[in-house]
Amino acid sequence: LRSHGSAKYPKSLPSLPVIGSLLHLGNHLPPHILFCNLQKKYGSLYSFMMGSHYVVIVNNHEDAREVLLKKGKTFAGRPRTVTTDILTRDAKDIAFADYSPTWKFHRKLVHSALSMFGEGTVAIEQIISHEAASLCQTLTTFQSIPFDMAPELTRAVTNVVCALCFNTRYSRGDEEFETMLRYSKGIVDTVAKDSLVDIFPWLQIFPNKDLNILRESVITRDQLLQKKLKEHEEAFCSETVNDLLDALLKAKLSMENNNSNISQDVGLTEDHILMTVGDIFGAGVETTSTVLKWTIAYLLHYPEVQKKIQEEMDAKVGLGRHPLLSDRKILHYLEATIAEILRIRPVSPLLIPHVAMKDTSIGEYTIPKDARVVINLWSMHHDEKEWVNPGDFNPERFLDENGHRVYSASQSYLPFGAGIRVCLGEALAKMEIFLFLSWILQRFTLEVPEGDPLPNLEGKFGVVLQVKPFKVTAKLRDVWKSVDIIT
Ligand code: HEM
Ligand code: PLO
């Protein structure tokens, strides 16, 4: 980079070959941890060139807030990458689309559809509770037999987002659900590796194999989405909008009927509708199920935390009724545990990369247009200046001396991002996580199967930070054995 007069750029790592070797010396550390460690040498804001891209890594909350909030619009761009282009038909979705009128329009449509069918209504509480009841039923059939809870958790979460997007649900053993599990794993294992990944070069060791898996997975996903679209078009009635897909179709049709070209201008094409629903469906499934898996993994490591959650529930909810969303106000310890999980194992430790849309600055440093800006949430959530023993799992850090939930335990905490690119599903995700966990823990105690190791808490980096598979036993709690109020 040329330096203009007094312009001061973030400290730059020496050069690509050196970074390459650094990454290798790092013994293949996952990028969020490597970028956190590099602060020791380069400070909390630093940059490097990766191929032709200038990349800035932000590791502290002051700078992150400037990027996401104070200068949110300036940094609202997204980079184009090989893998996300395959996933989204060249960024015709929301999450990987650059800042544009089309992106804005779709984000708004989805936002209002989600509040119409979900967040704002009692309907969503019923949908989630129904799935939670069905999940508990399944856990009962596994009574004390060690099993992998992941597919059942995923099915419960999928059914909630299925209800919102498509007005359908999957039963156990449904073939379409099994197909979805398979293609989604294929996508999670391969997408955003390459360009998060012009950034992470060692991943280029297997791009071809990965690209093939990604392409095949995307083809299968597209067939599923196409089928849903066809069914919705056939049954469409503009009077009864049942789900997100109906809402998108309605917007498209009403624009076409006004025989304007607006639908082309704002990009309300079939591709856009499919990719937008694909985003919400994909995000809805992979994020929430990941948080539930992390929570269970931690509860197995910290049985005393599980016990405290149960004691609080016994005292405040009891056995005579189901947990309700309104209990979020009184189940402080459970809410604190969820907050702590989102801190210690953020779903998206590097967010999605942002792009500077014009020449700008972060703090005293000049940032040129087109710079890719990676917010390292991991560093923020593990900052020793902001958290006491950040490596320790400790829900109490989100409670005050009266045991009440504190809302901003630290400024250095943004599990859903912030600003104009903030997560669209935050409210939905929080409702689901709370209800599923409270239903499960009201009735069951989760334990490590005898002779099995504790779950690995390291995490596998990808488009979401995944837990490695592990088994549990779900034992019906003694207090329940004599109770039959809830079936
Ligand atoms: C974006 C976190 C659940 C939909 C994001 C971002 C984060 C995030 C960190 C990126 C923000 C940025 O790049 O600045 C989470 C967490 C979740 C969760 C921790 C669960 C606990 C969901 C759910 C949905 C969803 C359930 C769908 C209903 C989206 C979408 C975006 C997004 C569409 C892209 C927004 C944009 O680029 O304009 N999420 N998310 N998320 N999330 Fe979530
Ligand atoms: C998950 C796998 C799906 O098959 C496709 C998909 C769509 C949207 C992505 C999601 C995946 C992963 C999590 C993402 C989400 C958009 C926003 C969310 C990246 C790849 C987060 C946490 O940022």
Image (cartoon, rainbow, N blue to C red):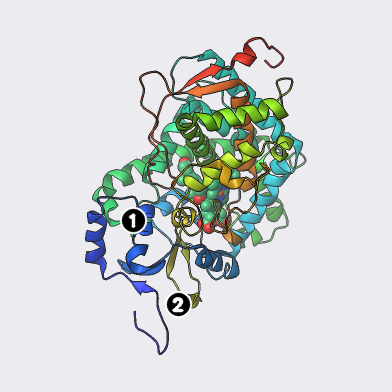
Is residue 320 depicted above or below 419 in this figure? above
Residue drawn at x 47%, y 29% is 300
Q: CA distance from mark 1 to mark 2?
A: 22 Å
Tag 2 secondary structure: strand
Q: Which residue is mark 1?
A: 34
Q: Earlier in the sequence, mark 1 or mark 2?
A: 1
Q: Quadrant of residue 469?
A: top left
In the picture provided, is 161 more to the left or to the right than 318? left
Disc 1 is placed on an element classified as helix
Q: Picture coordinates of residue 105 (x, y %)?
A: 63, 58
Note whether ligand 1 is within 8 Å of mark 2: no
Label disc, if present, on residue 365 of the rendered structure: 2
Whether residue 166 is visible here, answered yes or no, is: no
Towards the viewer: 337 or 423:
337
Counting from the top left corner in percent of width and height, residue 225 is at 53, 39
**102 or 316: nearer the eye?**
316
Residues tagged 1 and 2 counted as in contact (Cβ below 8 A): no
- Furthest-right residue in this view: 239
Q: Quadrant of the N terminus?
A: bottom left
Q: Is residue 204 left or right of residue 289?
A: left
Pinpoint residue 51: horizontal percent, then vertical percent.
Answer: 30, 66
